[in-house]
Image: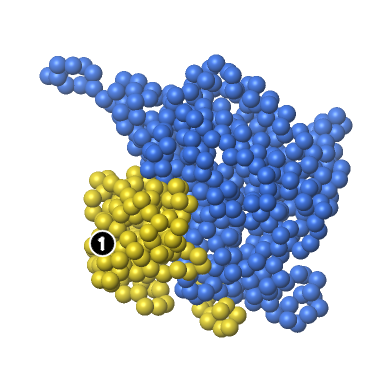
Amino acid sequence: MSLEDSQQERLEEIFEDLFERGALSLTEYLGELTLEVISSEYLSLCKQLQNNADMQMDQLIDLCGVDYSEYSGAVEERYAVVVHLLSTRLNERLRVRVFATDDELPVVESLTDLWKSADWYEREAFDLFGILFAGHNDLRRILTDYNFVGHPFRKDFPVEGNLEMRYDEEQKRVIYEPVTIENRVVTPRVIREDSRYV
Amino acid sequence: MSSSSNSDIRNFTLNFGPQHPAAHGVLRLILEMDGETIVRADPHIGLLHRATEKLAEQRIYNQSIPYMDRLDYVSMMCNEHAYVMTLEKMLKLEVPERAQYIRVMFDEITRILNHLMWLGTHALDVGAMTVFLYCFREREDLMDLYEAVSGARMHAAYYRPGGVYRDLPDEMPKHKPNRWRNEKDLARQNVGRDGSVLDFIENFTERFPGLVDEYETLLTDNRIWKQRTVDIGVIDPDLAKQLGFTGPMLRGSGIAWDLRKKEPYEVYDKLDFKIPIGVNGDSYDRYLVRIEEMRQSNIIIKQCVDWLRKNPGIVMSTNQKAAPPPRSEMKEGMESLIHHFKYFTEGYSIPKGEAYAAVEHPKGEFGTYIVSDGANKPYRLKIRAPGFAHLAAMDEMVKGHMLADVVTVIGTMDVVFGEIDR
């Protein structure tokens, strides 16, 4: 095996046993490669992607949560973590997706020991989706307000929120109340599968 | 302080921001100090969080373009660029070459716009007031260009999937006389505006290198500037990669990584420019890198102007399933009328799948990741903002430095909260 081989071929060779066990799958779409791994193999896979001389993924560019609960298609688990990796040495990119096995308590291994940049991205995914990262030593909320309740990017969290805030003249302080605004959908969401889009 | 301890010295915690002129917006820093030295810095962000990604899920694809302007609000068109590039990738939409050149030209104008803002505020934070005034003088010209092509000085929404909203106007708008402006001022403000927009851009590119020299005479060999920036916030190349640095922050540490060269998009592979890199990875090197980037951007703009002069043509894709029809046709043809109606009411659906596309934004790699389930609205949109990764390294960069250096480090990171908090 050499770097001359395509990224896909190299991946297939390095992770041969994972593919055989069905723990890993590889898809190519629009020239981008996506690895989908089972959560128990996620951390060791990422470690190999970082250290293997034929992969050298030295940068974690992005990590985000996705809530697949309303996705039209066969997705069994609800929460996924999607990682975008970049090798600046080989000029290659790779996407890794892992589904959390438990929908009630989604837990995924933390990548903070491999890439320091994972720290804030994982805090963000925890804040917005409630995905927990095992091994992350500072998993606090990051984007939402102090004392915020809920995980706003989950599909069942209303866009208009649950609470609104105002200054109360009588009590001379800021108070929280249930929201009074309603979500107004101007254009409905439609899925078109006609020939135009194929 | 407890009297039982045998020392009267202890660490104390200092709150910095969220409203502080040097915090570049709404950054709250909790600093743990040992005297004047910083032991730990904990940035609290999210004070400008507007849930752009969640809002985008509720809207048809085109309605989110203006949201992109409001992310990094000092480099508006580059944000749009990453978003429309992802859409074009998923729609497999071809962009006319003239539109590609216009985009590249405006990306570079935006880069200068961003770096001028960065230079002005960075110098202001460190203590040099004058640079700020000079930088804003030039920003005015560039914002007038934004206005000339899109109608808005900042939030342009000029890039659309399939091209740009419209071709460059034949006439550059001029300042008009009023009671607060005398003839002399008016003549100075209207320099170079007699011809088309391209003429004005060309006039700007001729003036600009001399103006960069002007900023440099104020800073590059300035002893105080060097005392405040040299060896402050040093990041070695391996650590920079570990921390997810991109753009000038990575290049300042000596890694020649630039998406315009490494993954050329639009017409960057046809243009001639160089990538400056730093040596020491300190704030001064990043300053030099960004100054040189402004000069290189100027060279790119010149090349684009030359090409655009010689090659007229369409600026919007003719694929009417994913791009609007020309207005003239819409009044005559039934087919175009239907396309127009469908395009602006229901929008277009994107085939099921996912894609990530990134551009070399003035601050680093700005990318958008879209998951589509075949609908006319994104299922999930994730914005990869360069500033988010940079600010996450705050603790790493200020540890062991003095309190005053925190301001230098915030400045050198070029943070803008629109993109960090999203």
Say above or below: A2 vs B154: below
In what element is the residue under mark 1?
A: helix
Give the residue at x 52% y 29%.
B285
Q: Is residue B175 visible?
A: no
Q: In the figure, is residue B184 to the left or right of B214?
A: right
Q: Report the residue marked by disc 1.
A: A41
> In the image, is residue A69 above or below residue B195?
below
Task: Tell me the amino acid under the disc marked 1.
Answer: Glu
Q: Position of residue B324 (x, y in %)?
A: 69, 70
The quadrant holding residue A18 is: bottom left
Packing grade of label 1 (10 A; few <14, some 14-19, many >=20) is some
Chain coloured yellow: A
Q: Residue at x 26, y 66 (%)?
A: A17
Q: Position of residue B233 (x, y in %)?
A: 43, 29
- Whether residue B354 is visible to the viewer of this picture, yes or no, is yes
**Image quadrant in which the N terminus of chain B is located:** top left
Residue B189: where, in percent of width, then height? 80, 35
- Side of B195 relative to B211 (left or right): right
Q: Which chain is blue?
A: B
- Residue A5 location (% of width, % of height): 44, 61
Residue at 72% across / 34% down in the picture?
Answer: B208
